[in-house]
Image (cartoon, rainbow, N blue to C red):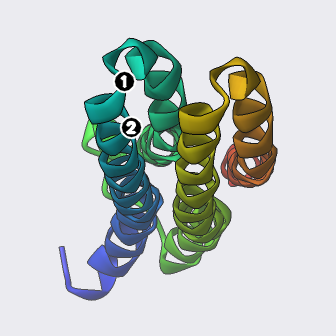
Amino acid sequence: MSFADLIGPVLTLLGGGLAATLPGIGSAKAVGFVGQAAAGVITEDPEKFGKLLILQALPGTQGIYGLLSWFMIMNSSGLFAGQLDQTWQMGLMYLFASMPIAIVGFFSAVYQGKVSEAGCALVAQRPNEQAKGIVLSAMVETYAILALLATVLAVLNIS
């Protein structure tokens, strides 16, 4: 197998890697920010832990979406089965198919973390308003779901 024969599989692996890595980094950063804010609130009132845990978990979903996209790319391309017969054109299509979840997943996780962090401040002052903080944070999630849908539809249409 020549170097030219490996361009397709390398591009496919790059696409899958970006799909899993960037949203994972965004989710890790966001969950960390929210965890720090929640810890501050919990030091004052440990009873609010359950309400804050939900807000902390929300921005972690983009990492899950990225991992799901990685799995679909690896499975659809045949790389899980050890097939290295992807052309450079197919590899490029998998790379481009990964871009919606890679880019939007990263940024939506970070910004959802900021909204969830603000939700922690809301719960600190008004614990009964937790649902409003969750809804505000979930609005950012919408764009991660749309990006996941775009990636899934693109991957499923690569032949």
Where on the picture, by quarter, is residue 9? bottom left
Q: Which residue is mark 1?
A: 45
Pick whichever, 13 or 61, lies toward us. 61
Q: Residue at 41% x, 67% y: name it.
A: 18
For residue 46, side relative to residue 124 (left or right)? left
Where on the picture, by quarter, is residue 99? bottom right
Q: Amino acid at mark 1?
A: Asp
In x, y percent, where is residue 10?
32, 73
The relative height of residue 26 versus residue 61 in the rendered view (above or below) is below
For residue 21, side relative to residue 150 (left or right)? left
In x, y percent, where is residue 2?
20, 82
Pick whichever, 97 or 10, lies toward us. 97
Q: Which residue is mark 2?
A: 41
Please, what secondary structure does the residue beneath circle 1 have? loop
In x, y percent, where is residue 12?
42, 65
Q: Residue at 53% x, 41% y: name it.
A: 120
Pick whichever, 126 or 146, lies toward us. 126
* Disc 2 from disc 1: Cα separation: 6 Å
| Label pair 2/1, CB-CB below 8 angstroms | yes
